Amino acid sequence: MIRSNYYYGCLTDNQKSLYKEIFSGIKEFAKEIKLPLKPINEISMIFNYVLLDNPQIFYVLSFNQLSDLYKQKCIVKPEYKYTQDFVRKNINFVKAYLQKFDALKAKSDIEKETYIHDYCLNNFTYDNAFNDYSFSILGPVLNKTAVCEGIAKFVKFTLDYLDVNSLVALGKSKNPVNGGIMEMHAWNIVMIEGKTYHLDVTFDMSLKDKRNRYDYFNLADEDIKKDHTIINKIPACTVTGNDYFSLNSLIMHNSAELEKFIRNALINGKKNIMVKLKNVKNTKTIVDKVISIAQLQYSNVYKRSVMVEVKYNPIQLVFEINFS
């Protein structure tokens, strides 16, 4: 079970009290938050949980901690990134920004999730320059660009507004576009109809070209772990068959299924096809095989040859086939 303040729910009763004190202090722009004496790693965990649960707190960088062993107290000093005037102005701005999603409130959770996913892909870009706002919701809202952390927090922020439970997950990943280098990464876990799934909008954004991608839409643990390593405490995502490709009958189990699917798509006038393959034994030759099948089916339908462009996600075995 997840909720909008998932990480709060992971804490003991004593830690929840500390969480509330930190949260309240940050909201009030307190210079010092006085707490019972605790190890620095425990305070750090709780402090980070506050920021993960509350994307609207975009104005805190980190904190310093002073310990008073004699009084058995510690003093947490948040590091604020912006002035209170700037924060008040932009909190009101982002709240007003959310109103553009009001029409979604009557939709189902999967419709809300799909819309927010597509909205991000169609309106935002990944910020390779790592600009000032890009690690928070201000990146997408003000500049229409952000890094994975800012994108994941925006997704949570909007889904919270639409009453869809979600959280920001942290870990490392192999981006399918940059050669599979392991990097620190953030994405989301969402709860749809009582089931939890991984949603990585940043990865789908990086893969998008001619059309939106859904390679990382509602994946189970077994699929996300092919290129993601999870480092924080998150709920298990064990349900399979509710990813985009399963729901839209876009999974092909063998060559015959792929041939039939491409042929029918071409007959119906489609020149851009997206599928996910299963049971692939030799990934080294799979792209050439898909191109060959696509060219043959095009020739059978249109009685002429064609150039075929294939975009390939080798980890998730997703293919975007474009006929020029």
Image: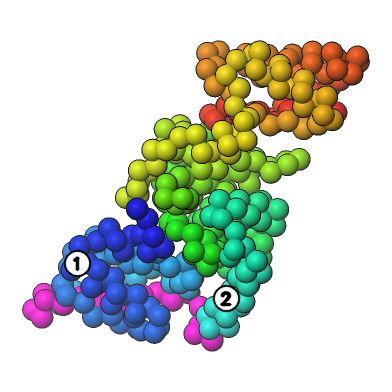
| Image quarter of residue 138 | bottom right
Q: Amino acid at mark 2?
A: Lys
At label 1, the amino acid type is Asp
Crowding at dot 1, Cα within 10 Å, few <14 / some 14-19 / many 20+, comes out as few
Q: Which residues are magenta?
A: 69-85
Residue 77 visible in the displayed image: yes
| Image location of residue 240, percent across then percent down | 45, 35
Please indicate whether residue 291 sits to the left or right of residue 120 in the image: right
Q: Is residue 38 magenta?
A: no
Residue placed under numbered mark 1 in the picture: 13
Mark 2 or mark 1: whose residue is earlier in sequence? 1
The magenta stretch spans residue 76: yes
Residue 216: mark: none
| Count of numbered badges drawn on the protein | 2
Q: Tell me how far mark 2 sits from mark 1, CA to CA.
A: 31 Å
Residue at image point 32% right, 67% down: 47
Q: Residue 95 — which label?
A: 2
